[in-house]
Image (cartoon, grey):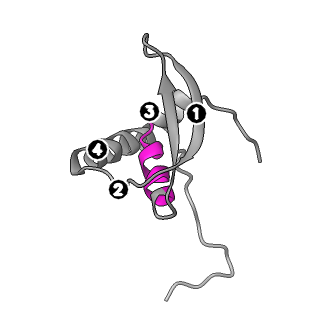
Amino acid sequence: MSIEEKDWEEFRGTGLLLFVNQFLHIFGWCLVFEYDDKDTLFKVFPAKTKYRGFSGQSQTEAYARLSKYMVETVELKETHPSPDFELP
């Protein structure tokens, strides 16, 4: 097993941030990304929020980004049943 460190911008770009924040919103939490005036990320932190959910457009865009990410990065492995496994 290996772990590959990624940066916050890549994480956000995959669309995963919206899904993580949707879950965190259930408990009144979220992850906040702060940018400077040059659109450079300088801080990420957890925060309490009263927001619940996201707009339909935001969700549609996040699903599209996540789908693209999955197509580009998931390694498909051919699977075969073991010799002892019998299909019905």
Task: Identify the residue shown where x is 38% and y is 53%.
Answer: 51
Q: Residue at x 46, y 51 (%)?
A: 49
Q: Inspect the image, locate mark 3, and give the three-letter code of the amino acid beneath it.
A: Gly
- Considering only order in the chain, which callout, 4 or 3, is on the residue closer to the N terminus? 3
Measured in 3D between alpha carbons, the distance from the residue under mark 3 to the one under mark 4, in whole angstroms, is 13 Å
Secondary element at tag 4: helix
Magenta residues, start to end: 14-24
User: Do labels 1 and 3 touch, CB within 8 Å?
Assistant: no
Of marks 2 and 4, the one in the foreground: 2
Disc sitting over residue 13 in the figure: 3
Spatial CA distance of label 2 from label 1 is 19 Å
Within-10-Å neighbours for mark 3: few <14, some 14–19, many 20+: few
Q: Secondary structure at mark 2?
A: loop
Kindly check if marks 3 and 2 are in contact, taking CB atoms under 8 A apart as contact: no
Residue drawn where x is 47% and y is 43% of the image: 17
Disc 2 residue type (three-letter): Gly
Cα separation, mark 3 vs mark 2, equals 19 Å
The alpha-carbon separation of the residues under discs 2 and 4 comes to: 10 Å
The residue wearing badge 4 is 58
Residue to which mark 1 is pinned? 44
Considering every residue shown, the one lying at the far right of the view is 1
Q: Earlier in the sequence, mark 2 or mark 1?
A: 1
